[in-house]
Image (cartoon, rainbow, N blue to C red):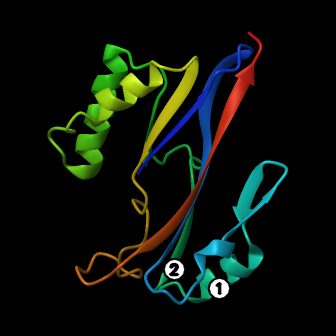
Amino acid sequence: MTFFAATESPDAAGMQFDTLLAAHVTTNSSDLSTVFDEQKGLADFTPAFREWCLTHSNECLFEYINVFPTHDNFFELTDCSDGETRQANTWLRENFGVVRDAGHVAALCELMSKHAKASAVMINTLRYANHTTWHMLTPATTVFSKMWAQFRIRHGT
């Protein structure tokens, strides 16, 4: 999954990925339209969804991504330098086993170059899921997901 955010604000000093909420279910039994609650620009999972998900752990999982410093299930592109693009390709290879990214990183950098400040985040959702309890790896399993990405715009110098 990839998220992109940009701003044309002349006062923006930078932009960065803050958090991502991800909800996954393996059946249609949960209505994902009421998973998130947003108040004053901040989102979280609704208490009802969290409760339902925790009691149905074999078919539901929710994740807070970019909360634990040791988790490396995302990579953020901020300047598209040669070093950063090499690191992005290494991250893709390590997370998904892809030898070539089919131009994904280059396309993101091209898109970012068209904006005053931008950020692109590649995410490996479900990387830290308990695959023993949550049987999402069987070929017959369909996973439905809904995600909320939060970016921060820094103003000033």
Please state if 7 lies on the left or on the right of 57 as rendered: right
Identify the residue position indicated by label 1 in the image. 52
Please state if 97 lies on the left or on the right of 87 as rendered: left
* Kind of residue indicated by mark 1: Trp
Residue 10 location, x and y as percent? 71, 13
Q: Mark 2 and 1 residues: CB-CB less than 8 Å, in contact?
A: yes
Residue 129, compared with residue 1, is above or below; it is below
Considering every residue shown, the one lying at the far top of the view is 157
Local crowd at mark 1 within 10 Å, few (<14), some, or many (≥20)?
A: few
Residue 91 location, x and y as percent? 31, 38
Q: Nearer the viewer, residue 84 or 1?
A: 1
Q: Nearer the viewer, residue 96 or 148?
A: 148
* Kind of residue indicated by mark 2: Cys
Q: Quadrant of residue 93?
A: top left
Considering every residue shown, the one lying at the far right of the view is 40
Q: Residue at x 41, y 51 (%)?
A: 1
Q: Residue at x 35, y 82 (%)?
A: 135
Give the Cα separation between the discs numbered 2 and 1. 8 Å
- Secondary structure under tag 1 reads helix
Q: How many marks?
A: 2
Residue 89 location, x and y as percent? 27, 33
Local crowd at mark 2 within 10 Å, few (<14), some, or many (≥20)?
A: many
Residue 10, compared with residue 151, is above or below; it is above
Question: Quick one: quadrant of the C terminus?
Answer: top right
- Secondary structure under tag 2 reads strand
Q: Quadrant of residue 153?
A: top right
Residue 71 location, x and y as percent? 48, 48
In the rendered structure, which disc, 2 or 1, sits on the residue that comes first in sequence? 1
Identify the residue position indicated by label 2 in the image. 60
